[in-house]
Image: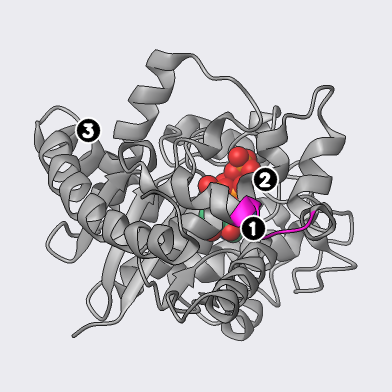
Amino acid sequence: MKKRLLSGLQPSGELTIGNYCGSIRQFLQFQKEYDSFLFIPDMHSITVVRENPDLLRKRIRRFVALYLASGLDANNCTFYIQSEVSAHNQLAWVFECLTCMGELSRMTQFKDKSTKLKNICCGLFTYPLLMAADILLYDAHIVPVGSDQKQHIELTRSIAQRFNHLYKEVFLVPKAVIPEVGAKIKDLQDPEKKMSKSNGDTNGSIFLLDDEKTIRKKISRAITDSEKKIYYDKTKKPGISNLITIYSVLKAIPLSITTKKFKNMTSYGDFKQKVIDAILETIVPIQEKYYQIEKTSLINEILDIGKKKANQIASAKYEKVRRLIGFGR
Ligand code: AQP
């Protein structure tokens, strides 16, 4: 039997090339080897902004269409929506009662996101526990993520071990899989920050559905430096290093070879043109397929199958947990 992979991308904004490099690319790489469970964590998406309901529903479907357009195959992957499987929040409650406030206070995502908000909801604080439930319900062996999610997977591992120790070996302890290159693509306007779906300034992110003109404009305006030399140094040259990383990942060329390739180039304009070409080579075919898929009933059909399969697995696991704790009659 194949080992299981599980991961999700919350529909908190439109998908970026950061999500592609850190996450989707790994799903593509592993989809044949692993029984892949890819879900849309719609319940996570309201931890920061309360979205327009129609927009959120559209975005959920759009994510599935983009997964398929990127090359993920419904024969290898199970696609489902988190809120359609009630065991996720049932198990999250159990985890809330097994976790101390101090552990959640240490989560850097919470610290980062909460500093930008006026009103911080409890969900933003506790969502790593819902994430732990998302993963542990399915006995996932690996969870491919970008580096910003590493800490949450470590917490998930601790919770699994804690439950197994307190009650019985019920949960498989998962492993985070983080790509060596591209695990944290930076914001084009502020290369100290991560490129994000939901950061207010859209100029810092390349979205998978951005058109060619927008991509050209965003890369041309990406923050660099005045040295006029192209080499990789994250501290001295964060902007250029970020563009080198994007190029390397999208062209599937090791960083060292990319760096050599551009060593003698002195024009940032010419270099940026190469980065634009690499982005367009990746994104345009995805967009072409996306616009075909979104018109069909395929997304609903795939999500119906996924909903049934996910519910079967998740409710059986939650039932075990319920029995062990002593809930019910
Ligand atoms: N900039 C990035 N570079 C590499 N990987 C990234 N990921 C996110 N941004 C980058 C990875 O994509 C997945 C998305 O996880 P998520 O939907 O839970 O979102 P997130 O980690 O909170 O980051 P986002 O996509 O920027 O969303 P917002 O703006 O809502 O916070 C994860 O595997 C993540 O590591």
Which disc, if any, is residue 129?
A: none
Vertical comparison of 300 with 152: above or below: above
From the viewer's side, name the closer residue of 283 and 26. 26
Query: Label 1 is placed on what type of residue?
Result: Ile
The CA distance from mark 2 to mark 3 is 36 Å
From the viewer's side, name the closer residue of 200 and 133. 133
The CA distance from mark 1 to mark 2 is 26 Å
Instruction: List x then y, in percent, for residue 288.
Output: 23, 40
- Tag 1–tag 2 contact (CB < 8 Å): no
Q: Residue at x 22, y 33 (%)?
A: 291
Instruction: List x then y, in percent, for residue 281.
Output: 37, 54
> Which residue matches tag 3?
291
Asked if disc 1 is less than 8 Å from ligand 1, the answer is yes
* Image quadrant assignment for residue 296: top left
Asked which secondary structure carries label 2, the reply is helix
Q: Can residue 136 be seen in the rendering of this structure? A: yes
Q: Residue at x 49, y 36 (%)?
A: 43
In terms of sequence position, does the residue under pointer 3 or pointer 1 come before the other? Answer: 1
Query: Mark 3 packing: few (<14 Cα in 10 Å), some, or many (20+)?
Result: some
The CA distance from mark 3 to mark 1 is 26 Å
Queried whether the magenta region covers residue 173, the answer comes back as no
How many numbered discs, if any? 3
Instruction: List x then y, in percent, for residue 19.
Output: 51, 53
Query: Label 3 is placed on what type of residue?
Result: Tyr
Q: Which residues are magenta?
A: 95-100
In terms of sequence position, does the residue under pointer 1 or pointer 2 come before the other? Answer: 2
Asked which secondary structure carries label 1, the reply is loop
> Which residue matches tag 2?
126
* Image quadrant assignment for residue 228: bottom right
Query: Mark 1 packing: few (<14 Cα in 10 Å), some, or many (20+)?
Result: many
Query: Label 2 is placed on what type of residue?
Result: Thr
Which disc, if any, is residue 185?
A: 1
